[in-house]
Amino acid sequence: MSVQWTKKRTVILALVLAALVLPLALVIVSGRSMWEQRQARQEAQTEFNQALRQSLERAAETVLPVPTLGDNALVVECRTADLEAELQRVVRLAGGLGGSASSWNNGKSVRIVANVPRTAETIFRESVSRGVYDLNSAGDSGPMTVVEVLLQPKK
């Protein structure tokens, strides 16, 4: 009886161990599967984000020219008290030609980036240089160009 009892005990112990190991194995296998799926989703999301960023950069380069304060920028000197009035004048000139302008004031000078129709660029530059106060013309819906104006206080 002792031999039969030992066999039964061994079989019961094997069944109990199998019952305990099976759920643990299922947890490990499913956890590993979920981890691999998460890694694949992260890689796909990273690739998508990179492709989207590149697409947006290409679209921005096509639509928006990159403004740089270079040799062809207009430099206008005026009194410190007149900087705001001069800024408004340049913005008004750009708007009168069918364009727009934005400015940045660093406390010492004002940088204006005007987006005007390419056909009116010369008129805009001459008007800014000559001190024209206001200008209205038929808005051109053609391609635009960037003109930079730097307002500096007189030294």
Image (spheres, helix red, strand yellow):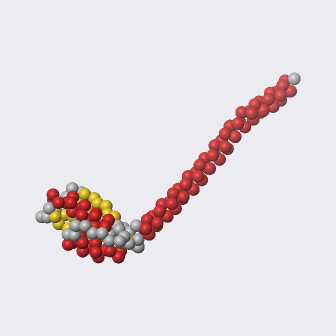
The image quadrant of residue 78 is: bottom left
12 lies left or right of 59: right
Q: Quadrant of the N terminus?
A: top right
> In terms of depth relative to the viewer, which is nearer, 12 or 104?
104
Query: Residue at horizontal 17%, vertical 60%?
Result: 82
Q: Is residue 23 above or below residue 136?
A: above
Q: Residue furthest top?
A: 1
**Relative side of 115 to 78, left or right:** right
Q: Is residue 115 visible?
A: no
Front in this rendered view, residue 71 or 102: 102
User: Is 65 situated left or right of 112 in this image?
Assistant: right
Residue at position x 24%, y 57% in the image: 106
Residue 57 position, x and y percent, is 45, 64
Determine the residue located farthest toward the left in the rendered image: 155
Please report the residue visible at 34 percent of the width from the left and 64 percent of the height from the top: 100
Does any portion of residue 103 appear in the rendered image?
yes
Left or right side of 56 for 139: left
Q: Nearer the viewer, residue 46 or 107?
A: 107
How many circles with numbers are drawn on the protein? 0
Image coords of residue 101 (percent x, y)? 31, 63
Horizontal and vertical percent position of residue 92: 28, 64
Q: Residue at x 53, y 56 (%)?
A: 46
